[in-house]
Amino acid sequence: MIKKDIIEKIEGEADVVFTQKNGLIKDVNLTFPYMRGVESILEGRDYRDALVIAPRVCGICSHSHLIAAVHTIEDGMRREKIKFTLSDKARHIRDFAIACELIQNHIKWFYLTILPQIYKVNHLEVPNDLIKKASKATYAITKAMAIFTGQWPHASYVVPGGVSCDPSYVEIMQAKALVDEVLELVRASLFDDTKEIRAIGDLHRALEMLQRADLLSTSHGSEHFLALADTFFSKSGEYKGATRFDVDIKKVKESQREDSKAKEALYGNDFVEVGPLARALINQDAIIMRLQKEHSGNIWSRIFARVYEGYVLLLKAKEALESIDVSEPSCVLEHNKKDISFAGIGIVEAARGSLIHEVVVKDNHIHTYNIITPSQWNLSRGSADKKGVARASVVGARSKEEAYLILRSFDLCSVCTTQ
Amino acid sequence: MKTDYKKIERMTPAMRIIHWANAICMIAAIITGLYIAHPYYQSFIADGAVDKYVMAWNRWAHFISAIIFDVTSIVVAYLYFFSRFEKPYKKLIPNAKNVKEFGEVILNLLTLNRRKRFDSTHSDSFNTVYFTIFHLLLFFMLFTGLQLYVHGLESGESSIGTWWPALLHISTDWTIPVTGGTLMDVRIAHHITMWLIVVWMVFHIYYQIWRTIFWEEGDIAIVIGGSKFVKDGK
Amino acid sequence: MAEARDESIKKLFDAKSAKVDTNKGEEYFSDLYESCKVRIGELKDMPIAGRGVDLRKALEDDGFERRDFLKWASATTAMLMLPASFTPLVAEAAEVMNRIPVVWIELSDCAGNSEALLRSDGPKIDEIVLDIISLEFHETLQAAAGHQAEKQLEEALELFKGKYILFVEGAIPLGIDGNFGTIGAKAETFKDHLLRLADGAAAVIAVGACATYGGIPAAAPNPTDAVGVMDLVKGKPIINIPACPANPANMVGVVLHYALTGSVPELDSLLRPKFAFGYRIHDNCERRAHFDAGEYVEEWGDEGAKNNFCLYKMGCKGPMTFNNCSIIRYNEAVNWPIGVGRGCIGCSEPDFWDKYAYERPMANAHIKAPTGGVEKTVDEFGLGLLTAAGIGIGIHAAASAIAGKKNSDEKDV
């Protein structure tokens, strides 16, 4: 019996068609009936326009797109030996903002996407206060971010060679207080870190409910992970069969699907999982490695890894703030060349995984611009024999709600997938 | 051989004052306008902001010259129709006589004075059309400029009363859709028109000098003394 | 398109567009006061739509005192350009806002406005006030999905027909018969979806630059042929709240104004509420003194940048942009783009993505979009024209010098 269904509760919207057999989900087809064509909009413009337009690919990860865009330019300049010096101060400020965006994404995803779905799988009513819980933390963290970025979403404070803001100590202290506020919230309702990291409160409740729904015994994961960017909080790598390999950016491939507006992304010839779980495994994080072993890559390790990354990033964000030396310059760009040509690639680790921007600039103008987003990795469809990551993990789900839960554990984001 | 010359009056004192007021205002508006568009010199960092006021002075000079332009434009528009000296609008009517004269003046310019079959004792049709183009450019400049200016009077108040911003809106809001729909289009149009006026001015000066040299009638003196000389018997 | 052109020509001489009249006289305001009182009374008697969150309780839960709320109310009264005597009414209106049903749809967008509105931005009380509006339907936010969500929407449309306020986020792609964006099981195009929902709405509020003017999706070459709400919806009151992202305080302002008066606030010619878009960023900018003084940042990270000089030469579009973000700022009023040394990009103005360009001085920016425009800067164009004129004159002068002499020689002989 084939049953059609539509899913909408993912950021933006995607059509989901499940195929069921004997009450179990046999296959799923995700399509994105929607596009804007941001890549073609960028072509022909001055390369610096990317710093304004690229963040607007997505209101959810706008800062990651901004950083990816500036990385493409800086990478290109480096290759063309155009001199610029990124000061430690600029680096720390960027890192802090990256951390903030990831933190708010992780918290929001947990409270607004995954937790309600876990309630639903358990046939329980979704509590009313989840939005409030999430917004308390996200208000504070985006506020801290805006001290340096001016606004969120769609900040534009980054320039090639640095940042435009020049914060004072007072502002740094203000940001620190806000980070502490969030840390307190996280310690009250997600993690106990007094001795060792332990899930408490809402996170523990999620675990209990997953247990009750019997979702911990079956595997809903992949075995092939990828993180492409080296960042202040994670290293790049490929993780396959419990071994870590170095990455080769040349192995990234992209192909267009016919029935959907999204493109697929492959590494070598494989579909790989990207995101916080991939990052944690590649970084050989002890806690996540243990979880992964215990639960052999089921949904819990993916959920825990993401929330846990939020917690780790809070500490890193504080570290970044403490390392800012206000006497350093914010931006040093020494080139005076009028028309520059370059090709550059910018990779960042966004909330949902590796994000790639690629640009070819001729005489200051963008010749081609290509964007590969995290959801393109996880949501690639593949073929019947070789299914994409999210698609494969849904097979065998016992109900539609369970399948939604698994899909949402990857956090489908159609907004930037279809650009 | 001696040629006899006859003195003829071409510009009244009022016209000459307007001419030079316009010329000075135009230079001032261009110098300050270019600064407003893109501040091309820097002020000394060490001075306090209140002592410098560089942009503010530039804008002041720009607006003052614009206002003088406004007033002379109104006077010129009046003189086009009601001047007791010469009524330029008569030369703008596209009748056979004016069209022929217009063509002849152009031919005169193109044949490098080989052919001169028109009366040069008064303002010819070509000259009048050319000046009319200038005044149209100027009007466009004034409307777009005042539109840009009224942005800063958004409260509807001004030092001379609320009628002024209201009048500016009534008379200049049409420039937004006409230039392309955004305030930026108004600004670009204002900027491009400046260049058109500069080009106009360059040809104007050249043509006056060329006429003086080739016609040998002392045309360049008109704008100073108000008169030129034509060969007697003409 | 022809219709739109006719309309814009009609508007050519429309003088009321930009003027902000803050003092309409005592009589006007006392009449307004009375009608607002009646309106609020009516709302009070109406059943609470949707979730029925009580503002007082919500504020209490979040640890706000009555005093904080009244402070907020007086600030909001000022923002709406009403006299201070309206403060108690504004406070009451906020409390009965949950009687007004709201439907929020997302079309061709990046979810940025939803993000700004619902989860991360705005002064806190604004947030809570927004929280209590009875959001009947919101794709990103609501719990239901798929068929269930569609059913909820249909029910809300039926129940609140002619009463709900429709918030629209995102542009409407018209290319390939609207098939660049479809919604729901029946693959209804965004255009049809919008028109159907707008039909039963009391008013349509376009939130963000995309819904207002087409936004980034409409940037040249406009691959999906995207347009804004006001290009499609006719015969309904439309309020535009542009900017990228739109400021939540202004969304609250509009809904509150509607609750208070039962009508849309005074709008400018681009249908933006004047209380928010009546003033230029430039005129309320914290760096304005440096503009007047001629003190500019010359390059990123220079001495000027360290001293918070004016960003005009870095391409700040504040002098061309009407918005109130220099006053109310972003993210709980903590900061705004100019506050972090980055110029305004003019995101509340039409075509900002093509015509306002990026952070380059206006005078030497490549202002036009990649297609369908002059690729040269205005000054290069002007200088080119001047050179052409100069060359023409040079040729003419040279020819005259050679030919003219001969002529006069002949005459003299």
Image (cartoon, coloured by chain):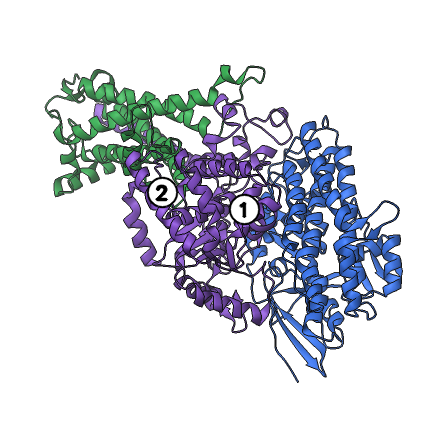
Chain colours: A blue, B green, C purple
- Residue C323 placement (x, y as % from top left): 46, 39
Horizontal side of residue C70 vs A153, given as left or right:
left
Query: What is the chain letter for disc 2?
Result: B
Q: Position of residue A144 (x, y in %)?
A: 67, 39
The amino acid type of the residue labelled 1 equals: Arg
C-alpha distance separating marks 1 and 2: 46 Å
Residue drawn at 73 percent across, 45 percent down: A185
Report the side of B226 relative to A68 (left or right): left
Q: Nearer the viewer, residue B55 or A310?
A: A310
Circle 1 sits on which residue?
A: C56
For the point 64% across and 40% down, the residue is A143
| C254 to C395, vertically: above or below | below
x, y percent for residue A182 = 71, 43
Residue behind mark 2: B176
In this view of the protein, can residue C138 be seen by the observer? yes
Above/below status of A368 relative to B93: below
Vertical placement of A190 versus A166: above or below? Answer: below
Q: Is residue B184 visible?
A: no
Q: Residue at x 25, y 34 (%)?
A: B130
- Between B201 and C65, which is closer to the camera in this rendering? C65
